[in-house]
Image: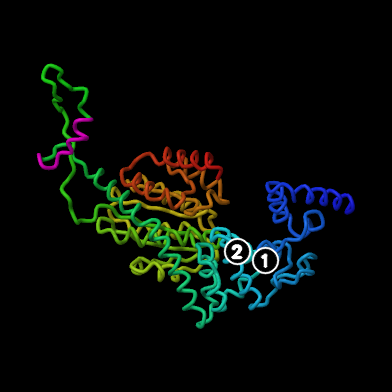
Amino acid sequence: MSQAGGAVGTNGLDDAAEDPAKRERLRRWRMVLGGPAEEALGKAEGRDGAMDSALAALYDGGGADGDNERSAKRSAGLGSSAPKVARWLGDIREYFPSTVVQVMQADAIERLDLTRLLLEPEMLAAVEPDVHLVGTLLSLNRVMPEKTKDAARQVVRTVVEQLEKRITQQTRAAVSGALNRAARIHRPKHADIDWDRTIRANLKHYQAEHRTVIPERLIGYGRRTTAVQRDVVLCVDQSGSMAASVVFSGVFAAVLASMQSLRTSLVVFDTAVVDLTDQLDDPVEVLFGTQLGGGTDINRAIAYSQQLITRPRDSIFVLISDLYEGGVREQMLRRVAEMTAAGVQVVVLLALSDEGAPAYDHENAAALAALGVPAFACTPDAFPDLMAAAIERRDLKAFAERLTDERKAGGR
């Protein structure tokens, strides 16, 4: 078998020497297949060899120490050596783009049980900050030694700042536009008439002989106000599976809280309920106020949130949870029904992350849908438009269906 493979490999290499395109294809196949393809496709040299060793250390269990013989046999691994892991983290940041580095870090934490090493400050200095790493750090918050907390906070702050740049402008624009549209009045004063929308709404009344539109209905905006126009309650499940959603929710809550036209509350829960509203001026403190892991009592969290809702028809309640209820299911559903009957715009998100639909309780999702509250996953990029739809009391079922169709079309 190996002789046949060697013969094929030799012919392929001979041909590749004369054909640059074929040589590049063989090189790519060698990088994909790793050490087992060395006999047929040759040894990875130079930068390719270093990349191959980094990949092997994670996915094949060998090569992190740069020993060519051990790399070929795939017999070594990252193990639990902090210096070796730190060097490996530095290597992958040098050889791969940041998006690939983040995937490899996440795989290393899962496959090689590197969680313990993340409690070392030198490890945190070597990693590429991203949402999933923040989730891991938050889950370690209770066992994190004091010497590591400053480094961990810097990692979290870096990611928070990246997310704020990504979402702040879009969120404020979408929410402000929705609030302005929701405040539109149909008996405006002359200075408040929205002439563009008024003309569009009255085109059927165009008078050809006068070459003008005679409006039967005026559309305008209410006068600008600094008063709070909507109350928003974000109620976030902080069980371990919701880590990325907790991170995004904390940053979105801080952005919404910075808008004077909204009164924003943030409630996180597992089997207990914690109100983090007073920390929303600093999203880093918000995230460190969470305690990822533990059970789930959605009913208790909704009961607390109901106390925060004093203007039902001007309130939006956003529950972010995979709906695996450890509390009293019947009461949970009854509370949701009470809120919708009172006029609260209820939104249920199975996840708020870039990963798409997670594992979730299908029975509870179906029960909520029967109450007129669809449960669906939402990406951070779509969340501002979702909030705008909720403010304008648009059909959220149609919004969810459109979001699902877009995700399918994008292959996610």
Q: Where are the magenta residues, as a range?
A: 190-200
Between disc 1 and disc 2, whose residue precedes? 1
The quadrant where residue 207 appears: top left
Which residue reaches farthest front? Answer: 18
Residue 151 sits above or below residue 158 on the image: below
Q: Where 310 sits versus 342, above or below?
A: below
Kind of residue at badge 1: Ala
- Circle 1 packing at 10 Å, graded few (<14), some (14-19), many (20+), is some
Left/right of residue 22 with respect to residue 382 in the rendered view: right
Mark 1 falls on what kind of element?
Answer: helix
Q: Position of residue 313 (x, y in %)?
A: 29, 48
Contact (CB < 8 A) between labels 1 and 2? Answer: yes
Query: In the rendered view, would you say 231 is above or below 112?
Result: above
Q: Please state the total of marks drawn on the protein image.
A: 2
* Residue 109, percent from left and from top: 62, 66
| Front position in the image: 95 or 332 | 95
154 vs 1, left or right, is left
At 71% from the left edge and 51% from the top edge, which residue is drawn? Answer: 29
- Residues at marks 1 and 2, CA–CA distance in whole angstroms: 8 Å
User: Which residue is under mark 2?
Assistant: 95
Q: Is residue 366 magenta?
A: no
Tell me the residue that label 1 is attached to: 50
Name which residue type carries label 2.
Answer: Tyr
Q: Alpha-carbon neighbours of circle 2 within 10 Å: few (<14), some, or many (≥20)?
A: some
Find residue 88 and report its image quarter: bottom right
| Residue at x 71% of width, y 46% of height | 19
Q: Secondary structure at mark 2?
A: helix
Asked whether 250 or 132 is in front, the reply is: 132
